[in-house]
């Protein structure tokens, strides 16, 4: 009996170590991705702590298909789809689960490069500034815009990533949202395709 208990203990301990290693790897990948994404952004960076429910629902709607494509072309009067990114059944389930998890996720300082993270109270104060938002951003944060970012959703052993970004500078038609797929090559993330790009009033 003691041997059985010891074996079970070792198994649980090793699983816990693997789980911790997976979490550490995931956290490191988030920080690496976001740091690269924001590298050329205007400084300082101001990020909303969470996405709102409407935005997450919109993201989920955009990610319903099992395959995505950037553009089509014609070949002898036939339409040819190019730049396709397809999902396996397992990836489809994982994507559904990950987008649902966005409802309960919020940004932590450890995942981001140096920046200001705005909680709901901070967002409410910012939005309440209305037409005065550009001045509010400048005087309060010395910034010219703020960001709504989703947590990256990684696929295929951190070689692909689905990511939502919205920027807002407080000016009329100054909000732009993009839902993107990135690919990772030689430790660098590059935009593969844009799934959604809209200017919001």
Image (cartoon, rainbow, N blue to C red):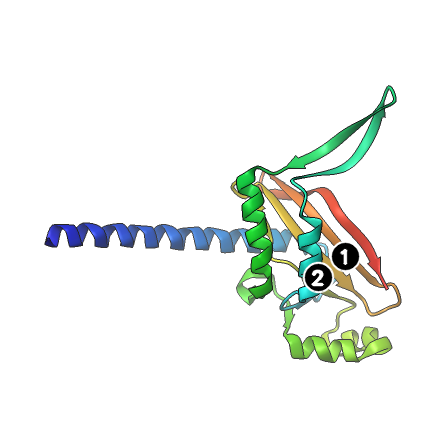
Residue 107 showing in the rendered view: no
Q: Quadrant of the C terminus?
A: bottom right
Q: Position of residue 88 (x, y in %)?
A: 57, 37
Farthest left residue? 1
Mark 2, Cα crowd under 10 Å, few <14 / some 14-19 / many 20+, is some
Q: Residue at x 81, y 67 (%)?
A: 169
Q: Residue at x 53, y 51 (%)?
A: 29
Q: Is residue 104 above or below residue 23?
A: below
Quarter assignment of residue 174? bottom right
- Which residue corresponds to mark 2? 55
The answer to whether residue 134 is left or right of residue 24 is right
- Real-space Cα separation, disc 1 to disc 2, in angstroms: 10 Å
Q: Residue at x 67, y 47 (%)?
A: 64
The front one of 71 and 176 is: 71
Check if mark 1's residue and mark 2's residue have beta carbons within 8 Å: yes
Quarter assignment of residue 72? top right
Quarter assignment of residue 44? bottom right
Q: Residue at x 56, y 42 (%)?
A: 91
Tag in front: 1 or 2: 2
Q: Position of residue 80 (x, y in %)?
A: 79, 27
Mark 1, Cα crowd under 10 Å, few <14 / some 14-19 / many 20+, is some
- Which residue corresponds to mark 1? 177
């Amino acid at each position: 009996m003691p041997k059985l208990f010891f074996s079970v203990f070792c198994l649980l301990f090793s699983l816990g170590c693997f789980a911790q290693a997976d979490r550490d790897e995931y956290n490191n990948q988030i920080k690496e991705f976001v740091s690269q994404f924001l590298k050329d952004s205007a400084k300082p960076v101001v990020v909303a702590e969470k996405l709102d429910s409407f935005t997450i629902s919109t993201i989920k709607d955009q990610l319903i298909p099992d395959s995505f494509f950037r553009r089509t072309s014609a070949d002898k009067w036939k339409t040819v789809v190019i730049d396709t990114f397809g999902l396996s059944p397992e990836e489809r389930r994982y994507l559904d689960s990950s987008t649902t998890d966005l409802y309960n996720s919020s940004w932590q300082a450890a995942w981001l490069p140096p920046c200001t993270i705005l909680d709901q109270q901070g967002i409410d104060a910012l939005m309440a500034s209305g037409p005065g938002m550009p001045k509010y951003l400048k005087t309060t944060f010395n910034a010219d815009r703020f960001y709504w970012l989703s947590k990256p959703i990684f696929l295929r052993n951190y070689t692909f990533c689905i990511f939502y970004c919205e920027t807002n500078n407080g000016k009329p038609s100054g909000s732009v949202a993009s839902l993107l797929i990135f690919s990772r090559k030689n430790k660098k993330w590059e935009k593969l395709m844009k799934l959604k790009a809209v200017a919001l009033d």
